[in-house]
Image (cartoon, helix red, strand yellow):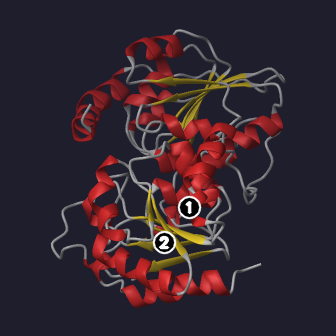
Amino acid sequence: MNIRIMKYVDGVVGRLLANGIPNTSYRPVKHGPKASFLIIRPGGIGDAVLLTPALCELKNTYPNCHITILAERRNASAFSLIPEVDQLYCYDKPAELWQAVSKKYDVVIDTEQWHRLSAVVARLIRSPMKIGFATNERCRMFTYSLPYSHDEYEVSSFKRLLEPLVGVSEQAAPPFPFLTIPATAQESVGKLLATLDDKPFVTIFPGASIPERRWGADRFRAVAAELAQKGYGIVVVGGALDLADAQTIAGESDLNLAGKTSLAETAAVLARSALLVSGDSGVLHIAVGLGIPTVSLFGPGRALKWAPRGEHHIVINKGLPCSPCTTFGTTPPCPCNARCMQEITVAEVVTHCLKQLEHPAG
């Protein structure tokens, strides 16, 4: 279903249901070692990836627990990188949605940050304990509603949802890497990268979920050319929507894998990279989860919430008065042609890339 239509339906139907359904009040004290958890995670790839440290914490606390994920088709493939997940369903596949909601769980955790329909689903599922963010009427659907801040790294926000559970440790930095690449993906990518002859390479991802976050293929191409002159290989990755940009970026000696790899295979490419250059994207968060250095370009998106943390990551953000402008996944039309992205120059991106490549942190 179209994302705009889904947001409209949520704003109308979701609000009515969240206000109309009686709230719940069960509050169990603790759970045994074989607790069953349903984690609701709609949205994109980035949200799914940054949820991983919380899932790892859940498994560490309850080693024998069973974790079921209710995702959607556009982010489901990200969970192939997360072995802590025992079962995966997609809510936009009716048969799978029914399988998920017809079962009983010890705990349901809705990790959606704003929209209401996922909270309504959590309320209707048979479970004595329901946890979620208290960002609007959705708070009525949970036994435990927790605050949400736009100034908190999303990894920390997701881990905050575990606070009502007994035995979960205090907030701590996530371990790296926290993603796992399937062996089949590693094998297939090894063949794709054979032409590089073990040369260190930089991966470039030009894509973004919205046009305002795209920096431009010509600029990425100029960065690729500069890095190639310094002796680094260039690999371009992306999906079907990135084919035209990838063709512009990749030179005769560069490797263009856009549209040729699954998400797991793209992750395997990133895992072998010396560096990823990307905008604010799900691919960026995968590189972070694999412990790969990055240079990322931020504008409309909230860097405090989404930008990578740590000395291995450089975030370029002009910090204009009008940015960030994205709130709960919605970016308003820009009256100045995404100036926050356009003012990022090729020269500064190249400089930061070379700093990461020639003087790596740690």
Is the residue 99 above or below the residue 2 in the image?
above
- Counting from the top left corner in percent of width and height, residue 201 is at 58, 70
Q: Nearer the viewer, mark 1 or mark 2?
A: 1
Q: Earlier in the sequence, mark 1 or mark 2?
A: 1
Q: How many marks?
A: 2
Is the residue 310 above or below the residue 11 in the image?
below
**Residue at far left of view:** 335
- Counting from the top left corner in percent of width and height, residue 59 is at 77, 35
Amino acid carrying mark 1 in the image: Thr
Q: Which image quarter holds the N terminus?
A: top left
SS category of the residue bearing label 1: helix
Camera sees residue 147: no
Give how far apart the Cα atoms at labels 1 and 2 are. Answer: 27 Å
Q: Which image quarter holds the C terminus?
A: bottom right
**Disc 2 marks which residue?**
296
**Disc 1 marks which residue?**
195
The residue at the point 22 percent across, 60 percent down is 332
- Counting from the top left corner in percent of width and height, residue 72 is at 43, 31
Camera sees residue 127: yes
Is the residue 222 above or below the residue 87 in the image?
below
Image-based side of 197 in relation to 263, left or right: right
SS category of the residue bearing label 2: strand
Amino acid carrying mark 2 in the image: Ser
